[in-house]
Image (tube, rainbow, N blue to C red):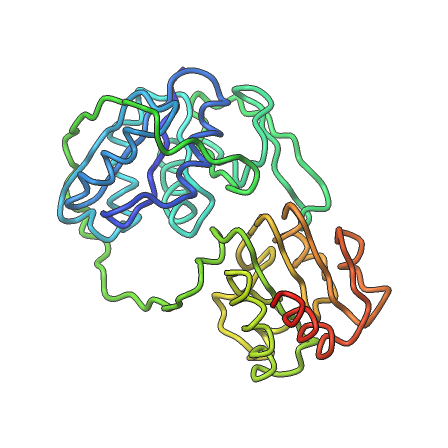
Amino acid sequence: MVALVIAEHDNASLKGATLNTVTAAAQCGGEVHVLVAGAGCSLVAEQAAKIAGVSKVLVADAPHFADGLAENVAEQILAVAGSYSHILAPATAYGKNILPRVAAKLDVAQISEITKVDSPDTFERPIYAGNAIAIVQSGDKVKVITVRSTGFDAAASEGGSAAVEAVSAVADSGKSSFVGRELAKSDRPELTGAKIVVSGGRGMGSGDNFKLLEPLADKLGAAMGASRAAVDAGYVPNDWQVGQTGKIVAPTLYIAVGISGAIQHLAGMKDSKTIVAINKDPEAPIFSVADYGIVGDLFEVVPALVKELG
């Protein structure tokens, strides 16, 4: 058995979720290869070759891979798919855009957002907003899998010495074209990769009140997040949303401020190593998953916490 991991990157550096996906691929048994499809992506290939546990890196370098268009990347995967028993990608917007196309073309059932590998053909994945775990066994010749990065430790980014092999790039499908990209700029860590996250909920009361959390995030070097209720109320941008329909995070420390803990939010952060909840309602569901809870007025507790941090 040989597993193929689809590298997520920006043509200059690998995205962290690729390392978690390599770990999942290694647990499937056999060798692990990585496919880097990009334009001028030699630096990414070099990084991929250093990942512990990777034995080969395939590089498809062509201008029409520059922006990671799903139609082109999927065709490149299909061009090399015959050699692999498992094809895996991170369960990010990138992976979710590409692998369903691959699964459809291969006429197999995709296995989505796995959090555990039980055996080469059996996997675990959360369902019902994380309230149940489904054990899925696949009889397909090729297993097409997206990997929830929070379920697996990241593979070591150094220590490997994989062979790098150039493969023939497929032609541009011509089915789509890159128009533009709007990127949110922030000096804070990226939410899904942050070691500490400070999130606010509807209890913040307004977008202006989210500024109360900034000194706390600054002291801790944390990313800032929010519940869906806060996003839907227009307090903060969509890309701050943590939860089943937002971003899945598992930082070392997650601080939930004014978040009641709806099931959809818990599904996105309950794997955090340490959870601190601040809420005036002692019956709030967030306390059921919190390691430390403070029942009190967030407008008094947060400034006091910042003061204690110095």
Q: In the orientation shown, which residue stands out farthest toward the right?
A: 283
Where's residue 151, x and y in %? 57, 38
- Write the residue at 47% across / 65% down: 239
Task: Locate the C terminus by quadrant.
Answer: bottom right
Task: Count the marks.
Answer: 0
Towards the viewer: 302 or 270:
302
In the displayed structure image, the side of residue 270 where residue 117 appears, left or right: left
Where's residue 215, x and y in %? 55, 73
Question: Toward which corner of the image does residue 297 lie, by quadrant?
Answer: bottom right
Task: Locate the N terminus by quadrant.
Answer: top left
In the displayed structure image, the side of residue 288 where residue 206 appears, left or right: left
- Write the residue at 53% across / 41% down: 113
Towards the viewer: 186 or 85:
186
Towards the viewer: 189 or 240:
189
- Write the residue at 57% across / 84% down: 208
Where's residue 16, x and y in %? 41, 44
Q: In the orientation shown, which residue stands out farthest toward the front?
A: 310
Query: Is residue 119 depicted above or below 217 in this figure?
Result: above
- Write the residue at 39% across / 66% down: 187
Where's residue 41, x and y in %? 19, 42
In the displayed structure image, the side of residue 107 where residue 167 appears, left or right: left
Towards the viewer: 91 or 279:
279
Question: Toward which corner of the image does residue 76 lie, by quadrant?
Answer: top left
Query: Is residue 276 depicted above or below 85 in this figure?
Result: below
